Amino acid sequence: MGRKRKELPLLNGVEILDVAAEGNSIARVEEMVVFIPFGAPGDVADIKIDRKKRNYAEGHIENLVNPSPIRVEPRCEHFTFCGGCRWQHLPYEFQLKCKQKQVEDALERIAKIPYPALQPIIGSENIWEYRNKMEYTFSNKKWLTFDQLRSGEEFPERRAAGFHISGAFDKVLDINRCHLQDNFGNSLRLFIKNFGIQHGYSFYDLREQHGFLRTLMIRISSIGEIMAVMVFGEDDSPKITTLLESVSNEFPEITSLLYVVNTKVNDTISDQTINIFKGREYIEEEMEGLKFRIGPKSFYQTNSLQAYRLYSVARDFAKLTGDELVYDLYTGTGTIACFIAPKVQRVIGIEYVPEAIEDAKINAEVNRLDNTEFYAGDMKNVLTSDFIAEHGRPDVMIVDPPRAGMHEDVVNVILDAAPKRIVYVSCNPATQARDLALLDEKYEIEAVQPVDMFPHTQHVENVVSLRLK
């Protein structure tokens, strides 16, 4: 007979002290640290422990005894269930303070090198409907909340169009309204969902891996262009045509209506054929008169207005005079490279994804920038001493790596190249701080500027300017 699992305790009247990693909050009970989602500093709550380790525990708020005075009413009806905006209950100004402190803590605890006082974080002008891209999943069996399960009520209609529950590939929360993108996105998603129900179209079964309606991507640019990419799990041409004709008639403002038939196990479409049903294969963004083409597979910062502010900071930190050779590492679709090209002699962009480099070349061509060059390949394999000897030693390097930061081999090549200035743009202050410690061998931090791209989440971008010692 198996051992009976020990019942974990309910801790009464616990005061929540601060915010913590991953958007959680933190409390201390005697010598034990407890991490709690959706708590606010100053809350007094009864905490049910869900998981206990030697040095810490994880729990949830069973009963909010005294709400913190800083709490605000979340706008979204799906708050706590969706998990995408874990800080909706915190005032935006407080969110910004927490993000600024996150950057300071990373520099203090991980980098452990001298740095100047941080410049005040640049907040987002729009804290709602700021995302230019959203992705939704269709499911034949929506996730039910614990309250719904305990109610004893029957839920015969289980088809859903919404977001995956965190950590559960086969569970989808049905969404009525998401406040992160223009409400057009909600209208389109609900139209397709209801059309599918009315016409008896099958919704995707995430466990069995079959079904007609699978996923939907919506991109809305700052100049009003709209892309909708409908992904089908079955190649049924009559149904595809019927649905997309109805979408086109209902939403004539869509400038790029595309579709994909994806019958493989995972949802990624990077290796799939994109079919054009209506309009162009791309939409356009604009920044200081420059146009950027964004395709269904392209990466572009998901907060258009803040992207402009972020890139403006990077350009200012580079202190360009017009004579520089600049290397733009992890260039993506060449957004930063094209953005700074009018201010420099030459820009060389390097990126791992070949399709992104093709987009970068198109963006340079569209904007008549003939002083750009782009190369595709693994950064540590492309950026070598031989590459630098062939293409020239950079005066400035701008690096914008993925969350994992830079490979140590890349850091070593940068140190060997010894550009006069490095501008490090990061979406992860922790890995950025680790890399800054490595660069400290030859560089000193000149300025630090956090930028908030994602209100109501714990995520923060940070730009650091380094100069050669």
Image (cartoon, rainbow, N blue to C red):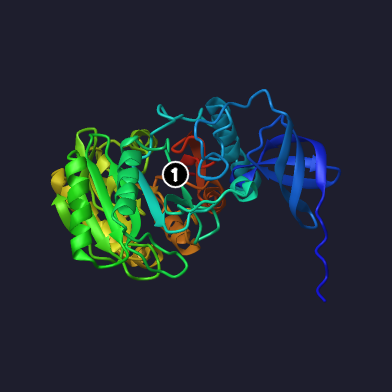
Judging depth in this view, the residue of 72 and 350 nearest the camera is 72
The percent position of residue 242, horizontal first and vertical second, equals: 19, 55
Task: Tell me the SS state at disc 1.
Answer: loop
Rendered image quadrant of residue 210: bottom left
The percent position of residue 270, horizontal first and vertical second, equals: 31, 62
Judging depth in this view, the residue of 403 and 119 nearest the camera is 403
The residue shown at (32%, 39%) is 187
Could you tell me how many numbered marks the image carries? Answer: 1
In the displayed structure image, the side of residue 414 where residue 58 appears, left or right: right
User: How busy is the neighbourhood of tag 1: few (under 14 within 10 Å), some, or many (20 plus)?
Assistant: some
Q: Is residue 102 visible?
A: yes
The residue shown at (44%, 70%) is 208
User: In this rendering, is residue 265 above or below 224?
Assistant: below
Q: Is residue 391 visible?
A: no
The percent position of residue 56, horizontal first and vertical second, equals: 76, 52
Judging depth in this view, the residue of 279 and 199 nearest the camera is 199
Identify the residue position indicated by label 1 in the image: 175
Q: Residue furthest bottom?
A: 1
Q: Residue furthest top?
A: 69
The percent position of residue 350, horizontal first and vertical second, equals: 31, 57
User: In this rendering, is residue 452 above or below 371?
Assistant: above
In the displayed structure image, the side of residue 20 where residue 403 appears, left or right: left
The residue shown at (44%, 45%) is 424
Check the picture and name the quadrant holding the N terminus. bottom right
Rendered image quadrant of residue 91: top right
User: In this rendering, is residue 252 above or below 170?
Assistant: above
Give the amino acid at mark 1.
Ile
